[in-house]
Amino acid sequence: MGSDGETTDANATDRTPADARVGTGLLDAEMGPSSALAHLYRGEIHRMKLWRERLDRTTNWAVLLLAALLTWAFSTESNPHYVILIGNAAVGLFLGIEARRYRAYDSWRSRVRSLQRNVWAPGLDPDRSLGSEDWRERLADDYARPTLKITTEEAVAHRLRRVYLPLFAILNVAWLLRVTAFAAVGWPASARVGGLPGIVVTGVVVLLMLSAGVVAFRPRTWHASDELREEDLRKERPGAGD
């Protein structure tokens, strides 16, 4: 019994220093990124790609719905115009789903960008400074306790700018065309929906479009990690022709 206890204690003692050195060498100043870090980066790229595809899938659903609604609404004059307004609600639902997916996508992308900015960029150009001095601690904290990095409102603003504001604009311009040029009565009476006068319906549509524009373009501090918002054309960069 005593010898077994001594053996167990010895094994525990042997494991302690190894456990204390877990993570050592993941990024050595002379050796560069280890294979473990490279596999980690590859896994994060894969996860980011999957969420990017989920975003595209939701956008495709919204575009297909928009095309189907407009085709049906303009197929005959007897079809009610308010179906296009129902389409606004459906596209808004897809916007909400895509905003949630975008928040998750941004979490994985922020990790990828941290590794690209602080590992691969300095590796390619040793004179380049790190993105932040505490990037290791911040990345380690994110792996220890993953969190969403941006608010729902910011995610909605991103998707409005990229996709959904043009979709809403197409829907509502088509609705305006439908109630003005293809209606049996004149506007605003042609925009009437049930007991709601046409002028009220039109006002609600305009108000919703203005609200979407405010959410998309109001001044804010963006928290999404390195979202592409600026152009840096190759022809404008020195040495582009080399």
Image (tube, rainbow, N blue to C red):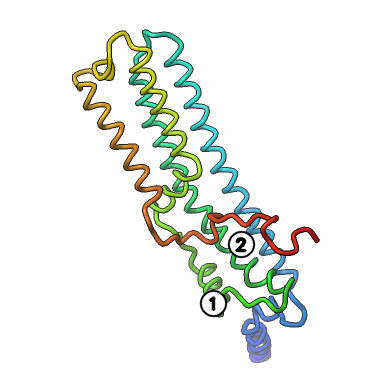
Q: Which of the image's four quarters has the N terminus?
A: bottom right
Q: Quadrant of residue 7?
A: bottom right
Vertical position of residue 4 compared to residue 184: above or below = below
What amino acid type is highlighted by mark number 1? Glu
Picture disc at residue 112:
2
The residue shown at (22%, 25%) is 199
Q: Is residue 234 left or right of residue 69?
A: right
Q: Is residue 26 left or right of residue 108?
A: right
The residue shown at (40%, 56%) is 151
* Camera-nearest residue between 103 and 162: 162
Horizontal and vertical percent for residue 145? 48, 67
Q: Residues within 10 Å of mark 2 (few under 14, many from 20)?
A: many
Looking at this rendering, what residue extends furthest in the right direction?
Answer: 242
Q: Quadrant of residue 116?
A: bottom right
What amino acid type is highlighted by mark number 2? Val
Q: Is residue 105 visible?
A: yes
Vertical position of residue 192 compared to residue 104: above or below = above
Horizontal and vertical percent for residue 85? 35, 26
The residue shown at (24%, 21%) is 198
Q: Earlier in the sequence, mark 2 or mark 1?
A: 2
* Camera-nearest residue between 113 and 179: 179
The residue shown at (46%, 20%) is 70
Picture disc at residue 137:
1
Q: Residues within 10 Å of mark 1 (few under 14, many from 20)?
A: few
* Camera-nearest residue between 95 and 186: 186
Q: Is residue 133 left or right of residue 188?
A: right
